[in-house]
Amino acid sequence: EFKLISQQKQEIEKNLKFKNTMMSKEGIINKEKWHKKCIKIRENKVTNKIRRTLSLTKEEFQERMKQNIGDEEKRDVDLIPIVVFHDHGFRIEYVEIMEITEDVHVGIAYRLNNCIEVTAIYVDKDELKRQHHLVSPQHNGECKCFDSFKTNIDVLYIGNPDDKKNQINALKKRLKTAQDRVK
């Protein structure tokens, strides 16, 4: 089992290092529908009283991700294994820490399923550490894998930052139209 995990990690790292292929980091950044990805927020820290949200358009998110890519010769891909539970059991995924702004990092989770697939975007460092300790129990206590992960947000939103406001305005307009018809 550990050998398979190591092989998967090496396969993903190898593909992410190459330039301009569909499974390269550039290829994944360009083709992913980031605004439709599952974003793992800091659920236990989010309240209705206070919430720190970062909203980016899909294009801006992609641009900031591309800024993390170095020259091919210098390119390091440091993937951290985590355990992810789902309806049919669990699987191992690999997280890469990406800087979005100076004080906001996210974890991009990959899995190998015939090709490299982005499965989620993580904002919560504590959740990632818990999931990592399940696959790497020797890291319990002294783990430094996520030391570079900094964030001051609870929620990340990718898409039109005014989407919710636009939806509310559209619903208000529909309500007014319906009320005018009743009169």
Image (tube, rainbow, N blue to C red):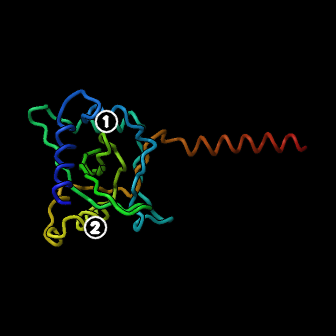
Q: Is residue 62 above or below residue 134?
A: above
Q: Quadrant of the C terminus?
A: top right
Looking at the image, which is closer to me, 102 or 133? 133
Residue 28 is tagged as 1
At 32% from the left and 58% from the top, the residue drawn is 91
Residue 15, picture quadrant: top left
What is the x, y in percent for residue 99? 25, 46
Query: What residue type is disc 2 on?
Result: Arg
Residue annotated with mark 2: 130
Q: Quadrant of the N terminus?
A: bottom left
Looking at the image, which is closer to me, 100 or 73? 73
Q: Secondary structure at mark 2?
A: helix
Residue 80, picture quadrant: bottom left
Q: Is residue 42 above or below residue 38?
A: below
Q: Is residue 59 above or below residue 100?
A: above
Looking at the image, which is closer to me, 14 or 132? 14
At 39% from the left and 33% from the top, the residue drawn is 59
What is the x, y in percent for residue 5? 20, 55
Residue 2, picture quadrant: bottom left
> Position of 96 compared to 183: left or right?
left
Q: Earlier in the sequence, mark 1 or mark 2?
A: 1
Rate crowding at label 2 as few (under 14), some (14 to 19) or many (20 or more) other CA atoms within 10 Å. some
At 16% from the left and 53% from the top, the residue drawn is 6
Which residue lies most toward the right here?
Answer: 183
What is the x, y in percent for residue 152? 32, 57
